[in-house]
Structures are given as structure tokens and as C-alpha cells.
Amino acid sequence: MANKPFRILTVCGVGMGTSLLLRMMVEDVLQEMNFKAEVEASDANSAKGARVDLILTSPPLVEACTGGYAQVRVIKSFVNTEEIRQVLTEFFDEKGLIESSEKGGS
């Protein structure tokens, strides 16, 4: 289990629209960051029980997603790649998953 893939869940109200959009945006940002992770989309009701490392969702759904296995982080604009990059970088840095040279955006 040492090479367990990092898992991210993107969440919206019903798991069919904006969570899919956010999943695609997160996958693009992860590729730019050269960070490998599995990204799945889901609805808010299923999120709390999901066995993932990180949940990304909108401010109104944070409470519905909190209290499960994963940390929950807010994305205010699902199409803002800079915001997504910042949230992911902060989370990965807290977990010790990125080198300090990767944080600067150089």
C-alpha cells in the first residue's frame, strides 16, 4: 500500500454537472503541476462516506461533506485554475507532498 494513489473527490449537489466540470479543471491543474492523482466527481450525499484524501466543493456544500474520511477544501469558482492551483498547492504542502521549489510557480 506504499504506492496508494492519491484520491480527490469533486462535489456538487447532484454529482452530474458542476462536479464534472470541477473534476476536469482539477485534472488539468494536476497535469500542469506534474502531480498524479485519481479524481472522481460525486454528489454531496455520497461525499462524506467517500474514501478519498481530499474533497473539493463549493461553500454551500462544505457542511454536507465534512465529518468523513477526507479533508474538505472550498473552491469558490470551479473554472478559476489559479484558485484551484492555490488550494491544491496549500493542501499538498501541508501534507508534505510537494517540494518547496514547486510552490513558487517559477
Image (cartoon, grey):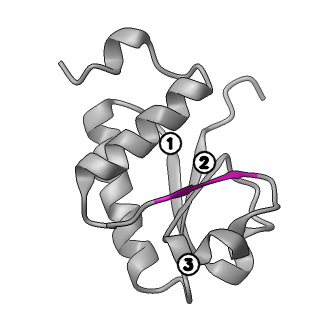
Q: Mark 1 highlights which residue? A: 37
* Image position of 14 with respect to 5: above or below: below
Q: Secondary structure at mark 1?
A: loop
Mark 3 or mark 1, which is nearer the start of the sequence? 1
Q: Mark 2 highlights which residue? A: 7
Q: Are marks 1 and 2 in contact (CB under 8 Å)?
A: yes
Instruction: Say which quadrant the N terminus sits in.
Output: top right
Residue at point 52%, 71% (across, down): 59
Taking the magenta stretch, the answer to whether it contains residue 81 is no
Residue bounds of the magenta highlight: 70-74
Instruction: Characterize the local packing of mark 1: few (<14), some (14-19) or many (20 or more) Cα atoms within 10 angstroms.
Output: some
Residue 81 placement (x, y as % from top left): 25, 52
Label ID, residue 11: none
Three-letter amino acid code at the position of disc 2:
Arg
Front-most of residues 4 and 24: 24
Q: Mark 3 highlights which residue? A: 60
Instruction: Say which quadrant the C terminus sits in.
Output: top left
State the residue lying farthest toward the left: 106
Residue at point 50%, 42% (across, down): 37
Image quarter of residue 68: bottom right
* Image position of 56 with respect to 31: above or below: below
